[in-house]
Amino acid sequence: MTDFLDRWATESPENARLVAQERLITEVTEALWQEMEEAGVNKADLAARMGTTRGYISQILSGSRNMTLRTLADICFALGKSPDISLNGAEADGWEFRPVEKFTCGHTKIRYTETGNVLHPMDCWKTAA
């Protein structure tokens, strides 16, 4: 990750969550591009194997269309591969997360709940935003 993204991700749990999303999207699409290249498969070939359009494949691989786990499984199947998923601690990337009891925010009327390492406003969404 770049120095900017490293710093930006540590500024807030929301930033860290957004960076984690983009990082996963990038890693998955890069892995698919690599597999396609090694197999000698272009977007038109992949579309034909999946029974869809080249435009749909372009949207998926560019990140402009949300790739579901079903779509990922379909792409892997079309490439004769199976996905290998692993989950690693975010701390390994140098991100810092603060426990809820240490978290302070600017507006005292907002209550937060923690899901994993991400804080979400429980109510007062307009105030939190």
Image: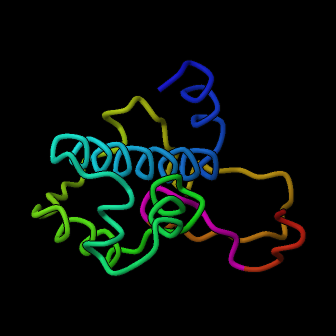
Quarter holding residue 70: bottom left
Look at 62% across and 22% down and name the residue there: 4
Residue 11 percent location from the top left of the image: 65, 36
Look at 16% across and 71% down and name the residue there: 77
Please give left or right for residue 128 compared with residue 44 in the image.
Answer: right
Residue 43 percent location from the top left of the image: 38, 57
Q: Is residue 115 shown above or below 52?
A: above
Q: Observer-nearest residue: 93 or 102? A: 93
Q: Residue furthest top?
A: 3
Residue 30 percent location from the top left of the image: 35, 43
Color theme of the render: rainbow
Q: Which residues are magenta?
A: 116-122
Q: Observer-nearest residue: 115 or 41? A: 41
Residue 59 percent location from the top left of the image: 54, 62
Magenta-colored stretch includes residue 9: no
Quarter of the figure that contains the C terminus: bottom right
Q: How many marks?
A: 0
Please give left or right for residue 50 compared with residue 98 in the image.
Answer: left
Look at 58% across and 71% down and name the residue there: 113
Q: Observer-nearest residue: 121 or 103? A: 121
Please give left or right for residue 85 compared with residue 50 in the image.
Answer: left
Look at 77% across and 52% down and name the residue there: 105
